[in-house]
Amino acid sequence: MRDFLPQNGRLVRDQHPEDAGFVDVVHPARATGMADCECEGAVDRHSKVFGIDNLYVAGSSVFPTCGHANPTLTIVALALRLADRLRSVAGNGAVGPDAPYLRNSN
């Protein structure tokens, strides 16, 4: 809670909350945002970079929007999802520019 932030060695909860400093942590995200089309983001729903064969991005940069809470679990979930997809596609022998996972799947 922001009203519990230390201010000059004391808590400001019951004194002057307007004097509390704002503390926040930055979680960089959205640099290569996930979208349904190239005009709105850099990667598709499968984390594949639009227009570049066999290039995928994993990390908070693919978030479609920026959040506030710690993104670690979401990053891990997206990375595991991508790993599963790549493993299943590679297991089917689908490689090269004509592989189904390389085409836009909108």
Image (tube, rainbow, N blue to C red):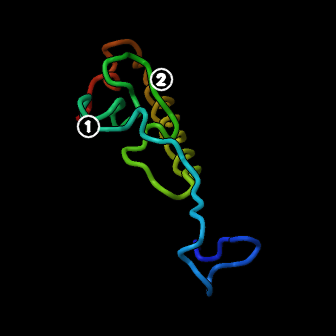
Q: Measured from the top left, where is residue 70 in percent x and y?
A: 57, 55
Badge 2 density bin: few <14, some 14–19, many ≥20, Cα 10 Å: few
Secondary element at image label 1: loop
The reply, left or right, for residue 88 in relation to residue 17 is left
In the displayed image of the protein, which residue is found farthest to the right?
Answer: 9
List the residue tagged with mark 1.
Answer: 36
Residue drawn at x 54%, y 47% as measured from the top left: 27
Q: Quadrant of residue 96?
A: top left
> Which of the two discs, 2 and 1, labels the residue nearer the N terminus?
1
Please, is residue 55 above or below residue 24 in the view? above
Please, is residue 32 above or below residue 7 in the view? above
List the residue tagged with mark 2.
Answer: 90
The residue lying toward the viewer, choosing from 14 and 51, is 14
Badge 2 amino acid:
Ala
Badge 1 amino acid:
Asp
Q: Quarter holding the C terminus?
A: top left
The reply, left or right, for residue 10 in relation to residue 75 is right
**On residue 72, which mark appears?**
none
